[in-house]
Amino acid sequence: MALSLRRRRARLPEAVRDALELGQRERVLTFAAEESGGQPTGTTVVATTHGLYAVDAAGTRTVARPWHEVDAGSWSAELHQLTVTWVDRATPAQWALGDTSLLPETLRERVQASVVLAQKIELGPRRSARAVIRQDLATGDLVEQVVLGRGVRPDDPEVSLAAEEALDYLREQVGLS
C-alpha cells in the first residue's frame, strides 16, 4: 500500500478570485491571507503573472498594481510582514502573512522578470536614482522609469538632466532610440 505525501494546495476563495478581475492569460501564482495571531484577518494578497493584488474581507480590491509599478519588497521574518514599495513613491503597502507564504519569493521573481535594463545614477554624496526600462508583463510593452532615492527631488534640474541622459543610454541599448 503506497501512501501519498502530496499535500492539497489551498484554493483561492471564489469571492477573492471574482474581485481580482484577472486579465486575459493572467493566472494566479500564489496567495496568502493576512494574519494576526495565526488567524486570518480578512485581506488576501495575491500574486499573479501580471500583478500584485489585495482583496479585503468585504471582497473589495484594495490593491491592483502591475509588476512594473512595484519598486521593491522586503520581508521581516520576525514579524512575518511583507512591505511593498511602489515606483511612484505612493505609501508602501504592508501585510502580516503566515511564515509559510511564498509571496516574498514570488514578488522578487516577478519584479526581477519585469526589469529589462537598469542603470544607477550617481548624484553626489548620498544621493542617487535609478533609470530603468521595464516590461509590462501583461502586454509586453516597455516602460521607462526613473526611481529616485531618498532625499532626491524630482524638480531638481541636475536630477532631470542626469535621468534623461541615463534613459537615453538605456533606450539605445534596448533599441528604443
Image (tube, rainbow, N blue to C red):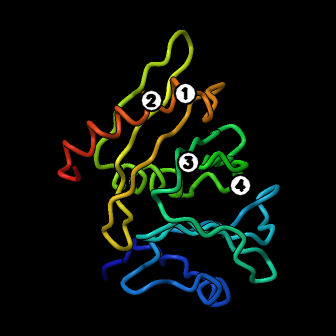
Q: Distance between the residues labelled 4 and 2?
A: 37 Å
Residue displayed at 55% across by 34% down: 148
Q: Is mark 3 on a helix, strand or loop?
A: loop
Q: Which residue corresponds to mark 2?
A: 161
Which mark identifies residue 50?
none
Q: In this view, does 131 lie to the left or right of 88?
A: left
Give coordinates of residue 128: x percent, y percent.
50, 23
Residue displayed at 57% across by 86% down: 21
Q: How far apart are marks 3 and 2 (CA)?
A: 19 Å
The three-letter code of the residue at mark 2 reads: Leu
Give coordinates of residue 53: x percent, y percent.
60, 69
Residue displayed at 35% across by 73% down: 139
**Would you call the spot at circle 1 few (<14 residues within 10 Å), some (14-19), or many (20 or more)?**
few
Of the two numbered discs 4 and 2 in the rendering, the one whose residue sits closer to the viewer:
2
Q: How many labels does the image show?
A: 4
Q: Which residue corresponds to mark 3?
A: 87
Vertical placement of residue 158 versus 53, above or below: above
The three-letter code of the residue at mark 4 reads: Trp
Nearest the eye: 67 or 34:
67
Residue displayed at 82% across by 55% down: 37
Q: Is mark 1 on a helix, strand or loop?
A: helix
Vertical placement of residue 135 versus 155, above or below: below
Mark 4 touches mark 1? (CB < 8 Å): no
Q: How far apart are marks 3 and 1 (CA)?
A: 20 Å
Give coordinates of residue 172: x percent, y percent.
20, 43
Of the two numbered discs 3 and 1 in the rendering, the one whose residue sits closer to the viewer:
1
Mark 2 touches mark 1? (CB < 8 Å): yes
Q: In this view, does 43 lie to the left or right of 1?
A: right
